[in-house]
């Protein structure tokens, strides 16, 4: 066992030395070509479909925000963004679009229980807009532009009912009542798609320019490819090996890098590494937050949730163990009534503009934002403009 640990440490030291040249990852925004604006987004086995074009129209849905794409002024852009942030809130109860029969959402065992809740039918227009927001959210930045995530949109009554069974408390009701729920899946083994990622880089506009620049020397091209592969493996910790080997190898590399940092007293700069799930989840959450703001801009209510059983969800929706599920987001129209904004534990999650309920409170600015003086020190020059 000691020999194995020693070998893993050697691997970590070797990789960390290659990173000593301060080859830090860059978070780049995806550069899509013009053809991406004409792609169709389809839900398998669904009637919902949207097609985007340059004129801002969608099949069956007119993009009411098309006029905002004409380069608004900086002040207008800032006001729009501030409005989205301030109006976003966690919807605690959704409006049911249309009731569905029990036979479409329940199994044979559930049909014997007439009091069993059933999921509602979804509003196709809201589902279409949610898909558009999800497509826009894909432009969120990711480490090395590796995009280590997948998304699963649940919108039919049957699938909503299956998902709701493994959601805790009122989360189950939100899944049943909302028009769709998006599952954000974090890829813990993104390095397995290295061939696909390499092909993606070559086909992208930046990849083509980069290829022309390095084609002058095959050695440089080979080194650049290997360097990127090495960095992606290092930061993602998603080694393309069987889990019984990948887990100890990932731990050994992270341990080796930490040892190099401690022994050199930070003279050799190496990155602080996390687990593969940590790396993929933080990239996935950038997309999730972008999706939330996109839905708010289109006057759709959302509720990000983490109270669910991952094992059960994987089973009923066929999600491979390769993917973690850091968050799911229910999307739809907010319920207007006495229970608006009140959770089952008595917590108010905020309400949209015009509501009589107060917005969600936050800790004071000076308690969470610090300046150059150091952590925990209030800086007088960090003042909020009125």
Image: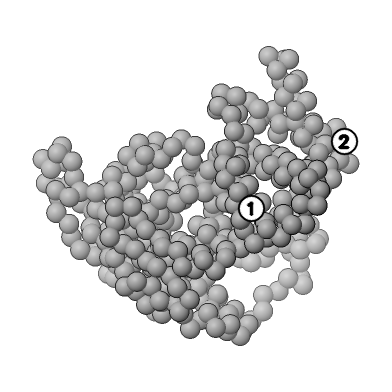
The label nearer to you, 2 versus 1, is 1
**Point 53% across, 79% down: residue:** 69
Residue linked to disc 2: 264
In the rendered view, tell whether residue 212 sits above or below residue 89.
above
**Point 48% across, 76% down: residue:** 54
Drawn side of residue 132 relative to residue 83, left or right: left
Indicate the quadrant where residue 340 lies.
Answer: bottom left
| Image x and y of residue 35, in percent | 51, 66
Q: Which quarter shows the N terminus?
A: top right
Drawn side of residue 63 relative to residue 338, left or right: right
Asked if residue 277 can be seen in this view, the reply is no
Tag on residue 201?
1
10 Å crowding of disc 1: few (<14), some (14-19), many (20+): some
| Image x and y of residue 278, in percent | 59, 43
In the structure shown, which secondary structural element does the residue marked by tag 1 occupy? helix
| Image x and y of residue 32, in percent | 57, 63
Drawn side of residue 229 relative to residue 22, left or right: left
């Amino acid at each position: 066992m000691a020999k194995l640990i020693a070998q893993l440490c050697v691997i970590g030291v070797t990789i960390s030395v290659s990173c000593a040249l301060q080859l830090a990852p860059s978070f780049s925004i995806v550069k899509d070509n013009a053809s991406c604006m004409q792609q169709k987004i389809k839900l398998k086995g669904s009637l919902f479909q949207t097609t985007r074009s340059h004129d801002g129209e969608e099949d069956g849905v007119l993009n009411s925000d098309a006029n905002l794409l004409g380069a608004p002024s900086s002040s207008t852009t800032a006001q729009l963004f501030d409005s989205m942030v301030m109006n976003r809130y966690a919807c605690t109860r959704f409006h049911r679009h249309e009731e569905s029969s029990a036979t479409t959402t329940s199994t044979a065992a559930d049909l014997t229980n007439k009091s069993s809740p059933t999921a509602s039918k979804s509003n196709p227009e809201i589902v279409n807009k949610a898909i558009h927001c999800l497509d826009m959210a894909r432009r969120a930045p990711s480490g090395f532009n590796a995009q280590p995530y997948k998304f699963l949109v649940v919108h039919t009554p049957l699938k909503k009912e299956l998902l709701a069974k493994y959601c805790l408390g009122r989360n189950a009701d939100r899944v049943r009542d909302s028009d769709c729920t998006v599952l954000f899946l974090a890829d813990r083994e993104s390095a397995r798609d290295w061939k696909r990622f390499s092909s993606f880089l070559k086909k992208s506009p930046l990849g083509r320019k980069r290829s022309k620049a390095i084609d002058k020397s095959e050695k440089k091209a080979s080194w650049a490819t290997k360097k990127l592969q090495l960095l992606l493996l290092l930061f993602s910790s998603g080694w393309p090996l069987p889990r019984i080997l990948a887990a100890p190898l990932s731990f050994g590399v992270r341990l080796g890098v930490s040892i190099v940092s401690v022994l050199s007293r930070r003279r050799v700069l190496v990155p602080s590494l996390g687990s593969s799930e940590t790396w993929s989840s933080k990239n996935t959450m950038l997309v999730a937050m972008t999706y939330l703001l996109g839905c708010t801009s289109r006057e759709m209510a959302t509720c990000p949730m983490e109270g669910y059983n991952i094992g059960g969800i994987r089973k009923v929706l066929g999600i491979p163990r390769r993917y973690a599920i850091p968050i799911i987001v229910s999307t739809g129209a907010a319920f207007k009534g006495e229970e608006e904004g009140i959770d089952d534990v008595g917590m108010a999650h905020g309400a949209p503009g015009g509501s009589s309920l107060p917005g969600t409170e936050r800790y004071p600015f000076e308690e969470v934002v610090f300046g150059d003086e150091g952590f925990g020190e209030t800086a007088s020059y960090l003042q909020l403009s009125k």
